[in-house]
Amino acid sequence: MADAPQGTLPVPPATAAKLTPAEKFQLITQNLGEVLGAEQLKALLEERDLVAYWGTAPTGRPHLGYFVPLAKIADFLTANVEVKVLLADVHAFLDNLKAPIELVEARVDYYRRLIIAVFRSLNLPLDRLKFVVGSSYQYTANYNLDKYKMSAITTEHDARKAGAEVVKQVSSPLLSGLLYPLLQALDEEYLGVDFQFGGVDQRKIFTYAEAYLPKIGYKKRSHLMNLMVPGLSGGKMSSSDPNSKIDFLDSPSAVKSKIQKAHCAPGEVEGNGVLAFIRHVVVPIGELFKGQGRADARPWVEGDAPADAVFTIKGDPKFGGSVRHFRTVDELDDAYAKGEVHPGDLKSATVQAINALLAPIQAEFNGSQEFQEAEKRAYPVEVKQVPAKKKVKKYTPKPEHLKTPEEKARDAEKAGLDETAQLREAVVETLSA
Amino acid sequence: MADAPQGTLPVPPATAAKLTPAEKFQLITQNLGEVLGAEQLKALLEERDLVAYWGTAPTGRPHLGYFVPLAKIADFLTANVEVKVLLADVHAFLDNLKAPIELVEARVDYYRRLIIAVFRSLNLPLDRLKFVVGSSYQYTANYNLDKYKMSAITTEHDARKAGAEVVKQVSSPLLSGLLYPLLQALDEEYLGVDFQFGGVDQRKIFTYAEAYLPKIGYKKRSHLMNLMVPGLSGGKMSSSDPNSKIDFLDSPSAVKSKIQKAHCAPGEVEGNGVLAFIRHVVVPIGELFKGQGRADARPWVEGDAPADAVFTIKGDPKFGGSVRHFRTVDELDDAYAKGEVHPGDLKSATVQAINALLAPIQAEFNGSQEFQEAEKRAYPVEVKQVPAKKKVKKYTPKPEHLKTPEEKARDAEKAGLDETAQLREAVVETLSA
């Protein structure tokens, strides 16, 4: 790095223009699970800055999990990458044909405002951030023709394989799920990007894109993959898991209450969503702030900490706990694994960090009537109908060995239908996770 | 029927306007394998004339088998149905991405001219015949959106089931094959028709369309199905079977030679392509001519035959054969089954009939430079490269029980690839058969 203080990454926007291609490459590819096509990107960086794409389907409410890809996208923006955020309205609409297209349009608007607010809270330059709404090109004749072309060279087997990690493997997936990899590949061409960014769960879709785009005459793109980060309740971070979900507009006390319920077993690092959030969101953002010369904007590092500290945990003095500063995330994980950090203290520090991250975003929301109206349009308050009390029929399933072949077949079919419903959800999670 | 001579069907165009709704219904639905939604059509006919659709993908050269649906479409035209012929260029193009789109466009042109020539040779009114090229609407945003909608409610299982009789069932079909039923259903809406016409092999696609169009807010159409007619060589009439294929431009001697090779076992009616062609093409067209007051335009009925004869067979006097006139196709089949009609005599009469049917079409072709040029553009003469003589490697397959598991897996995969190639062909046959 040319002139940024040593050990601080990424650099402040003002210095981005002074970065060498090698430094940009380092910044773009750091802290990732995997990079496919690194040499291609290196070569391009010798000539010009890069263009990237990250997709999200505006279905449910964006939750704290979005901070993970956004924290990484911050690196891209700092390295002067033009980042196209695909707001996949077509897919969001199709996921639930019951939701009118107007609602999806309102959610597109809310997602756009929220993502901008997040990047603004991180002091990032927004001139290289572009939003593209899927319907702006996914209905065109050319896209349609290319989709036909892809479908004429892709077997059901290969489409299923490509979606294997993001589309639940059931005996009878919906065709829309099978088309997913084709669309996601074509988007790279239609958005005109050099690389696509997503989670490592997208790997097979990405390798599909690398193999099939050239078959219809388009160039192969690079693919950058985030590691998968567990949700705060331990499982995959998901908007369908209410315990895992902290909303960007949750109040400080709501955040506190949700984190207190989070799964965070003493000494357990693997699958610990709290530690993962610190590793993938809090600390990288802290490093970004330091690079921007705003080290003091990190309330998760106590004021008297050494200059290279990334996280501070204050043990409750009632239980003889003391203040500990960590220089790396690995150090924190190690201390937690050894039982030197109490889960309650870790949670308290995390609550403080999350609330600090949310505060400027909520301030922007509260200061903008437009933003508030966008939220209301996107998520209108549901008038819940109180259902008339129904007599609950108690159902004792017949033991398997007593079932007739017809009964078994019916049960198998019912299970298949359930799988299909789950698949629909999984398909949308693909883009939104 | 109001005023047409008794026993003659269909009526001449001039009298079509005088047909009652019930007479039109009878004409539209006669000689079919199956009708779905007959009541709906009856009700509509009380108010207005109908609109129908029949699709064909202009891939190979149209062959004599096309006479079967066209002879039935003649009934529709006579009953004042507006018939839309879908020239499915998108599918034809996708079937073989190697063929440039220009070639497909030229074939669309040739198919259109040929179909018009056939109907003109049958003295049919052409003002109710419309040609629609698939690409004229299949790339539009609305169609695309509807395709997405259909794919989001159709499982792979249901798509596969819908195509079960027309798309070869393999372990890994191409996605384009799975999309087929969706497109064919949507075409009904986009072409604005009351019913679709096809072979009984289309039944599952038709019932899919009936079930799924209403799910996205479109109305359910009726479906009229032809019986499947065996090819002249006994199997399915197919452009990929050279023995079964008589070209519309084949010379009388070429027709004679091909028919002489046709499979036509003595006494065998089932699967007899020659008898089937007489039943489904020659006799209906003869009845059409009679209805038009042109009974003498049937060289397959000898001049001295009784007025109600539909086909004449002249036994070779050398072998003691005599001239026999048949009043119905069933009578002819019965006589053949009993061995009273010699295959050679049947073939001679058939050659005469086919050449009589082709003569006016070929006259139109020979009289039109445009038509001839269209044919040249559509089917440019291939310059065959004489391959250098290669030493043929004799391949003796390893016995199954001696193969390693890897070898077995490789063989299985290879078989799958072959299946996929066959499927591509089957998919296009769907529309063209």
Image (cartoon, coloured by chain):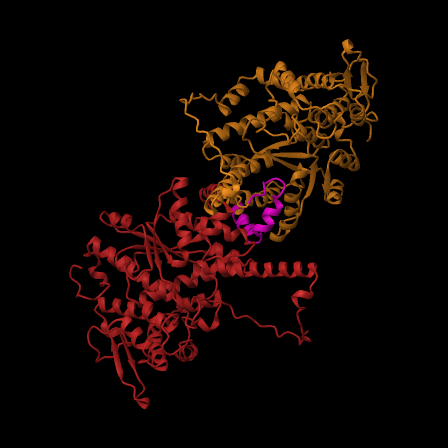
Chain colours: A orange, B red
In the depicted structure, whether residue B192 falls above or below residue B286: above
Query: In terms of image quadrants, where is residue B272?
Result: bottom left
Residue B151 shows up from this direction: no
Q: Is residue A327 left or right of residue B133?
A: right
| Image quarter hosting the C terminus of chain A | top right
Q: Nearer the viewer, residue A304 or A319?
A: A319
Q: Is residue B263 magenta?
A: no
Q: Is residue A246 left or right of residue B242?
A: right
Horizontal and vertical percent position of residue B227? 36, 62
Query: In terms of image quadrants, where is residue A40?
Result: top right
Q: Is residue A164 magenta?
A: yes
Q: How many marks?
A: 0
In the depicted structure, whether residue A304 falls above or below residue B206: above
| Image quarter hosting the N terminus of chain A | top right
Horizontal and vertical percent position of residue B107? 46, 62
Horizontal and vertical percent position of residue A364? 60, 18
Q: Is residue B348 left or right of residue A215?
A: left
In the depicted structure, whether residue B60 falls above or below residue B203: below
Q: Which residues are magenta?
A: A143-170
Residue B28 shows up from this direction: yes
Which residue is the extreme one toward the front?
A402
Horizontal and vertical percent position of residue A294? 75, 19
Query: In terms of image quadrants, where is residue A36?
Result: top right
Q: Nearer the viewer, residue B224 or B362?
A: B224
